[in-house]
Amino acid sequence: MLEVNYNLIFTVINLLVLFIGLRFTLFKPVQKILKQRQEMVEQSLADAEKAKANAEALERARLEEQQHVAIERAKTLATAQQRATEEYERILSDAQEKADSIVKEAEQDAQQERDAILRQAQTELTELVLDTAAKAVAGAGSEGDSALYDQFLQKAGELDGAENR
């Protein structure tokens, strides 16, 4: 028959106690630590996914804002250019009006000066004719006529020179 040796039974019991002891003291804590690390890695991966989704959402928002800013900038630039063009047109028309009024005033001044010179010349010519006629009546000789004629031409030349200035 089979003999059961007490040593064999004690060895089996010792192995069972050792297995149970190792299981509670070594395997359970190691499995617990491994499970915690696994959860921590999964949590880190989930946080990374959330951060990636947030970054993508922020990037989309930034791009939309950048497009909005570009549109606003274009509108502002167009408005500023339109205002500048209007201001340029206004300044140009004001300058043209001022130039026209200055030219008109200058023409009026020149016309008035020309009229004054003509009146003065007519007055002097009338005086010259009257002087000549008075001298002609006073001196009846041909030498006197010749001298009067020379004197008339000389004075007329002076008047003509004054008009040309």
Image (cartoon, helix red, strand yellow):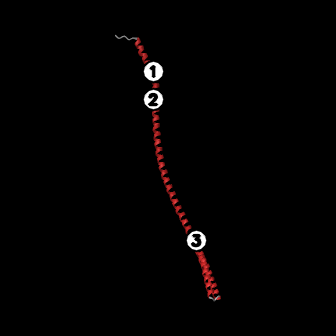
Marks 1 & 3, CB-CB < 8 Å contact? no
* Residue 19 relative to residue 133: left or right: left
Please state the horizontal and vertical placement of residue 138, each as a whole percent of the image: 65, 88
Tell me the amino acid under the disc marked 1: Leu
| Vertical comparison of 52 with 84: above or below | above
Residue 141, numbered label:
none
Q: Which residue lies under the disc numbered 3?
A: 106
| Vertical comparison of 69 with 138: above or below | above
- From this viewpoint, is residue 113 visible? yes
Inter-mark Cα distance, 1 to 2? 18 Å
Neighbour tally class for label 2: few under 14, some 14-19, many 20 plus, Cα within 10 Å: few
Residue depicted at x 42% and y 18%: 16
Please state the horizontal and vertical placement of residue 116, each as a whole percent of the image: 61, 77
Kind of element beneath mark 1: helix
* Residue furthest to the right: 138
Kind of element beneath mark 2: helix
Tell me the amino acid under the disc marked 2: Lys
Marks 1 & 2, CB-CB < 8 Å contact? no
Inter-mark Cα distance, 1 to 3? 120 Å
Query: Which one is earlier in the sequence, the residue at label 1 or at label 3?
Result: 1
* Residue 131 relative to residue 5: left or right: right
Residue 22, numbered label:
1
Tell me the amino acid under the disc marked 3: Ala
Q: Nearer the viewer, residue 112 or 97?
A: 112
Residue depicted at x 55% and y 67%: 99
| Vertical comparison of 90 with 65: above or below | below
Quadrant housing the N terminus: top left
Residue depicted at x 47% and y 44%: 59
- From this viewpoint, is residue 133 visible? no
